[in-house]
Image (spheres, rainbow, N blue to C red):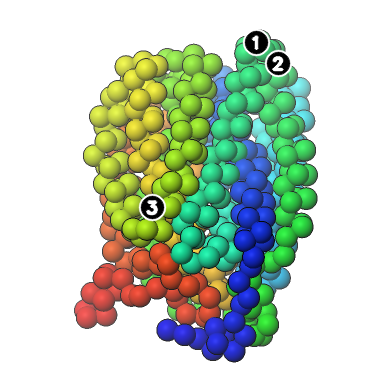
Amino acid sequence: MTSASETEHPATPPSDKEVRRAIGASAIGNATEWYDYGVYAVVVAYITANFFPGDGGTGTLLALATFAVSFLVRPLGGLVWGPLGDRIGRRRVLAMTIILMAGATVCIGLLPTFDAIGWWAPALLVLLRLVQGFSTGGEYGGAATFMAEYSPDRRRGFLGSFLEFGTILGFAFGTFVTLLLQLTLGEETMMDWGWRIPFLVAGPMGAIGLYLRSRLEDTPVFRELQDNDGIEAGAGTALKDLVAHYARPMLAMTGLVIALNVTNYTLLSYMPTYLEGQIGLSANGALTLILIGQVVMAALLPFAGRLSDRFGRKPLWWASLGGLFVAAVPMYLLIGTGFTGALIGFAVLGVLYVLQLSTISATFPAMFPTQVRFAGFAVTYNLATALFGGTAPAANEALINATGSLLVPAFYMMAACLVGMLALPFTRETAGQPITGTEIPGNPAPGEALLHRA
């Protein structure tokens, strides 16, 4: 369906050079954000010792709960940053979120420990994690929207996959920095003060990301909406419009995000703790394994993104969800056999996960029209992630402690994949489809047709 905003003042397509600059700056900025967010996951042992000392696994559980607590404010971040991004532009919001994220991460590296100031130390850590969560509530939805609106329709999957390349690159760089420090400083020095260095590195990284983002224009799609005076009418009532008119894509996206982020935070955030605490690998061995897996995943992302442009987003999602459901238990049994088995098991699960990860920057923004796109993405994504994704490491650890079963992460992933499979029939296929205008892109999905007939 063609809307008035598409015909009255059509957007001028950006040049190839502008697209490359936008994609590069978005990916590098996203890598910076997710380095900041992910580095916590690979230094959990040091966070536990310095902020949550105690006997048994209580300290580790508290450290993982502190990881999860930042997700509580991500929906609030989405509620603030999403409508703001639909009103003042994607670029400005992305500049503000990267400043907040980098600043909070550097401050974590400067915090006094429990031995120095007692319970004030974990309290301040929680506060800074909340600031990180609030920032991330606008970062991911904004970056994905920015990428999707800059990308040509027929290459949105391929170009959008570079946002996830940046995400994995950020996680991998955090793992690499920590591993390098462990090898050069040793365990005792890392426990004493070396753990601070990965957090302090976020300062210059944030400055680079801010510089790159500040040099870009806003997306052609958003500028088209501005030219057609669609912002006040759309973004000013974004939250009301979301609930009243876009409940279906919000529910469908919620199901997909549950599958995506339970897998994500189980594989990428909880795995270092799982390998060390439950499987018994050394800290260096666990980080080496994770780093190898992350590099392989990053290398495969653009190829999977290109496949989604050719065959569609939904076939890749079906392959990923079905593959993870079938392979989860066998691969976790393999992970429990030692380093080699863990490397193979992690790699297989990572490759299957890449099939959905590579498409989300093209899939999720296209589920909403331009005037509520940032808000729709940010609110839905962050609410689902807060409830199910960010809690995955702590939930896995608690369930393993309660049941004694090392297969808990596999069962958790399988349940999440089932939720994704229920949501996928209600999701529109938008590969090759334009995402301009004020109508939901794509043709109605089969699930929509069933609902209308009912």
Q: Which mark is residue 186?
A: 1
- Reading the image, the residue beneath label 3 is 307
Q: Amino acid at mark 3?
A: Leu
Residue 204 lies left or right of residue 435; in this view the side is right
Determine crowd level at label 1: few under 14, some 14-19, many 20+ residues with C-alpha closer than 10 A: few
Q: Which mark is residue 192?
A: 2
Q: Nearer the viewer, mark 2 or mark 1?
A: 1
Q: Nearer the viewer, mark 3 or mark 2?
A: 3
Q: Amino acid at mark 2?
A: Asp
The earlier-in-sequence mark between 3 and 1 is 1
**Inter-mark Cα distance, 3 to 1:** 43 Å
Q: Position of residue 28 (x, y in %)?
A: 65, 46
Q: Are marks 3 and 2 in contact (CB under 8 Å)?
A: no
Q: Amino acid at mark 1?
A: Gly
Query: Which residue corresponds to the image point at 66% horizontal and 32% vertical from the top-left?
Result: 122
**Inter-mark Cα distance, 3 to 2:** 47 Å
